[in-house]
Amino acid sequence: MQLCSAIGTRRRLLFCVATLSILLFLLHCFLLLNSSNSTSSPTASEEPSVSNTTAVEIVDRINIDNNYSSCESSEPPVLKVYMYDLPPEFHFGLLGWKGRRRNQTWPDVADAGRVPSYPGGLNLQHSAEYWLTLDLLLSNSPGRACRPGRGGAALRVSDPGLADVVFVPFFASVSYNRHSGLRGKGEAGRDGALQRELVRFLRGREEWRRRGGRDHVVVAHHPNSMLEARRKLGPAVFVLADFGRYPAEIANLDKDVVAPYMHVVASVGEESKPFEGRPILVYFQGAIYRKDNGIIRQQLYQLLRDKKDVHFTYGSARGNGIRRAGQGMASSRFCLSIAGDTPSSNRLFDAIASHCVPVVVSDDIELPFEDVLDYSEFAVFVRAADAVREGFLLDLLRGISREEWTGMWRKLRSVAHHFEYRFPSREGDAVQMIWEAVARKLPPLRFKINKERRFLRNYR
């Protein structure tokens, strides 16, 4: 009996120990689970506030994440851009576009077949405004950042508070060509009226008043465009062909961007002819009698027109003029880019597209992207005073060896894509290069703005 009693006591003790162990184990699991939950789920006092974040900001951040975080190889944009939703009469309406829906502001650029075309011929050379606007419209389309060879320098955002710059989508060159008092084919004088309306609109916007318009980007690539508005919008970042018709206090390299002309001859691409396939030494075809700096064209014409291996003649875009010029440049070693009515000329960019080494005769020219491109590697520069000296220019060019020319030709082939306007834009093309050039203007601009705001709080 004593033995049985001892065995029973021992069993009860073992049962109690086992039960206690199970309870301790369960308690440990509960504590671990509770600790994990408390770490991953903030308390009410730790939850992020939504009251200080607008719905627009949330959408913009989602767009940025969708476009630039979903692809391992993609990079964030260098520039976030807010674009005004100006009525179509300021942009695509000037091209004859009308929306299919009531009050439709923009064409559906996701469908390339519905993108309004730009006027052809020489009009194309000043079309930068068109390509930049299209790029912004497409920039936050789903999957844009993941496409092969994508462009991605700029991203359109819906909230100006998130933007680095504000883009003004006014097709100033088209407006001048079609509706100025001098050249208008339709409603003459409409160009001036649009400029006045634009100035009133911008000066009434909080975005303009916030920084005096200095973070706004205005494209006025045609030298005669924005004649009425340019002084009133002078604080903005202008995208121009050159500074020939602007006073220095309105347009200068400190704040503005020089953009390439769009070439009008066909790009030679992989069919580029080497030294032996270019029998013409020097090529120029275009308007010879010009105003202002363009007087040098007449002087060079008199010097070069009868020289061996030189093609220097008058030409126009009529008939097959552009096609013939393209063929001639693609068969020439050197192509003259001479100052015209202003320091710049489209022939520089036609030469680049033809892989014909440019010979620039323009003392006051400013070149696109020269802060990142060394033009001396693929172009020859001659001072105007030297170019008109008897024999100087031809002796200089004939003295360039085959090996030296070939090195410049190879460099031309490697940089030509920087001067191509495309839609959709591609990495490193003219559209992306312009956005990157605008981005490089921002640090000194922010420095100046912040410096001016030092005493703003005390002297309101």
Image (cartoon, rainbow, N blue to C red):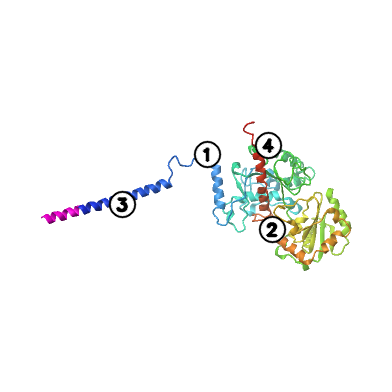
Which element is circle 1 on?
loop
Q: Earlier in the sequence, mark 2 or mark 3?
A: 3
Dot 2 corresponds to which residue? 417
Q: Is residue 4 magenta?
A: yes
The residue carrying pointer 4 sits among few (fewer than 14), some (14 to 19) or many (20 or more) residues within 10 Å by Cα, namely some
Residue depicted at 69% across the width and 58% down the height: 417
The residue carrying pointer 2 sits among few (fewer than 14), some (14 to 19) or many (20 or more) residues within 10 Å by Cα, namely some
Label 2 amino acid?
His
Residue 70 rendering spot, x and y as whole percentages = 54, 54
Label 1 amino acid?
Asn
Q: Nearer the viewer, mark 3 or mark 4?
A: 3
Give whichever of 171, 338 is nearer the camera. Answer: 338
Dot 3 corresponds to which residue? 25
Q: Earlier in the sequence, mark 2 or mark 4?
A: 4
Q: Earlier in the sequence, mark 1 or mark 4?
A: 1
Dot 1 corresponds to which residue? 52
> Which of the numbered marks, if any, corresponds to residue 203?
4
Label 3 amino acid?
Phe
The residue stretch that appears in magenta: 1-12
Residue 26 rendering spot, x and y as whole percentages = 31, 50
